[in-house]
Image (cartoon, rainbow, N blue to C red):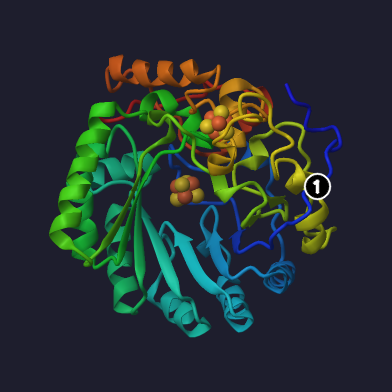
Amino acid sequence: MTDLSQPLAEAKPAAIAPPLWLLAELTYRCPLHCVFCYNPVNYTDHKSELSTAQWVDVLRQARALGAAQLGFSGGEPLLRDDLEELVGEARKLGFYTNLITSGIGLTDKRLDALKDAGLDHIQLSFQDSTQELNDFLSSTRTFELKNRVAQAIKAHGFPMVLNCVLHRYNLPHVDRIIDMALAMGAEYLELANTQYYGWAHANRAQLMPTAEQLKEAEAVVERYRREIGDKCKIFFVVPDYFERRPKRCMNGWGSVFLGIAPDGAALPCHTARSLPGLTFPNVTDTPIKDIWYESDAFNRFRGFDWMKEPCRSCDEKTIDLGGCRCQAYLLTQDPANADPVCDKSPHHESVIKVVHAAAARAPDEHPVLFRNDANSRRLATSGDDDPPTQGAPT
Ligand code: SF4
Ligand code: SF4
């Protein structure tokens, strides 16, 4: 395996563009326990959080570098009571701001304050169109509350993206999820098929859909797009495992995306912490300009020199940049390998096997693993993938 703890052998690329998109993960704390949560499974190892003053400094430095889009995310960013102050600072700096939230804690009072602070956009997540599945997948009773929050967001005049992560359990509900988004007046609906990192990877056997489910859901989305026109823009992204070429992950490592984790670690993508051996610089002791242009972590997978075969000599490498480093590591144990979603990868068979196993499996064969502190601590200390779980509704 490529040893990421060793200093970078290759020179950094000559031309590095500035970051455009800053994701401020204000906290890993969250009242929900989603089985597909994209936070690291060992998030309990990273409990410290930047202060308000440190976040303000992050915003100023990133804006000075050129970042223009800013997402406030988490965990649940509303758990930070300085959110409004940070939004206000971001507005003053000229960022376009988006709040990415489960909706829990988004009261009328906070919506008023966020409006006054200049928040531009809100992305609200649902787990499903049914109370039963929404509440099961988040291990909370939040469906009714989320519905009220959606109404409040619209009543306050915010443009709204409704986000729903798709998988084996809710793909048959895609029509009802679209109806729900239309009824709520959402301008955008993001039907985000599960990407298998973090908690979703731990629950991969449960969540992986069948090819038929995906095909049917895509046909439903196409029908709605024809019928509703511009009323609501629907994004539907097919999960990597069903493709023959990988995605151009984050539009390239260290290319446009700068993520800052709650403890100040700077990340080229929000799952990069899963890569062993790579030390991520921290904004508490390193200027963001140095992190972006000079750090080993951000230069590690820029350009093409890091590539192994078959990517190194592949005539498609400028299109997908070899795919996702985290997926390459999770499925081949070497982050410098080709993303095995690619059918030119010698490891592609591992992806096919997972897809075939999903098709052959009864829906409730595997219990699910909820994101919570106890499971996180157990995974962090033991690497054990088998903490207490609970059967999913069929
Ligand atoms: S995916 Fe669920 S548990 Fe994870 S941060 Fe979002 S709302 Fe919280
Ligand atoms: S071999 Fe590598 S560069 Fe070529 S298409 Fe596959 S992942 Fe992309």
Percent coordinates x, y for residue 364 in the rendering: 30, 22
Percent coordinates x, y for residue 323 in the rendering: 56, 37
**On the picture, is 60 further left or further right than 31?**
right
Percent coordinates x, y for residue 125 in the rendering: 38, 55
Q: Quadrant of residue 2?
A: top right
Residue positioned 48% across, 77% down in the render: 114
**On the picture, is 198 further left or further right than 354?**
right
Q: Assess disc 1: are there few (<14), some (14-19) or many (≥20) residues with their C-alpha within 10 Å of its C-alpha.
A: some
Is 54 placed above or below 361 here? Answer: below
Residue 65 seen: yes
Q: Residue furthest left?
A: 227
Residue 139 seen: no
Q: Nearer the viewer, residue 69 or 345?
A: 345
Is 39 placed above or below 355 here? Answer: below
Quadrant the C terminus occupies = top left
- Mark 1 C-beta closer than 8 Å to ligand 2: no
Does dot 1 land on a helix, a strand or a loop? Answer: loop
Q: Nearer the viewer, residue 115 or 31?
A: 115
The residue that mark 1 highlights is: 12
Quadrant the N terminus occupies = top right
Q: Quadrant of residue 139?
A: top left
Residue positioned 22% across, 53% down in the render: 178
Residue positioned 23% across, 28% down in the render: 212
Amino acid type of the residue tagged 1 in the rendering = Lys
Percent coordinates x, y for residue 252 in the rendering: 61, 47
Is 79 placed above or below 56 here? Answer: above
How many numbered discs?
1
Residue positioned 41% across, 62% down in the render: 123
Q: Nearer the viewer, residue 299 or 134?
A: 299
**On the picture, is 1 further left or further right than 172?**
right
